[in-house]
Image (spheres, rainbow, N blue to C red):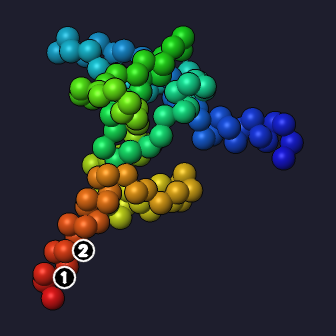
Amino acid sequence: PQPAQRLRGLAAINGMAVARLALKDSLIKAVEADAPQGLCVYPLGSLLNHSCLPSVNRLPFRSCLLVRSNGILLPGQELSCTYIEVRAPLQTRRTELESSWGFHCECCRCLLEERVWSSELQAAR
């Protein structure tokens, strides 16, 4: 592909909407994506793999990417984030990942849910 096409493709896959902190009426700070400000590409942040049970959350700001742990991280544990809405059912998540990202998710959560659903279907027969 042409350099411009390649660059657009890389931005489409690795770009993150810039976020901003918004002060709500309740005085609770919340993070909101501010799409009109565009996309940022963070080379190190782009190395995070997907998991439906992510170990970190990414918060992209104009000048930096904040990566926050979702719990205690063990030495050597992979840092993973989510590419999709993880509250969706297994098949919905897998379909979205296959169509948008080109892979079949086999993270620990998907494999567990797959085993649970298949054993429940077998038990119902």
> Which of the 4 image quadrants contains residue 50?
top left
Under circle 1, the secondary element is helix
Q: Nearer the viewer, residue 100 or 30?
A: 100
Residue 63: image location, x then y, percent: 54, 11
* Residue 118 locus on image (x, y percent): 24, 74
Give the crowd class for mark 2: few <14, some 14-19, many >=20 residues within 10 Å: few
Residue 76 in sight here: yes
Which residue position holds label 1? 122
Q: x%, y% of residue 33? A: 43, 27
Q: Outermost residue toward the right?
A: 2
Which quadrant of the structure image shows residue 88?
bottom left
Which type of secondary structure does the marked residue at label 2 adopt?
Answer: helix
Q: Is residue 6 depicted above or below 100 in this figure?
A: above
**Front-most of residues 28 and 115:** 115
Location of residue 47 in the rendering, given as x and y in whole percent from the top left corner = 54, 33
The C terminus - image quarter: bottom left
| Amino acid type, label 2 | Ser
Along the viewing direction, whichever of 36 and 93 lies nearer the viewer:
93
- Which residue is drawn at the image coordinates 79% and 41% (left, top)? 5
Q: Is residue 115 above or below residue 1?
A: below
Q: Which label belongs to residue 118?
A: 2
Asked if disc 1 and disc 2 are in contact, CB closer than 8 Å, the reply is yes
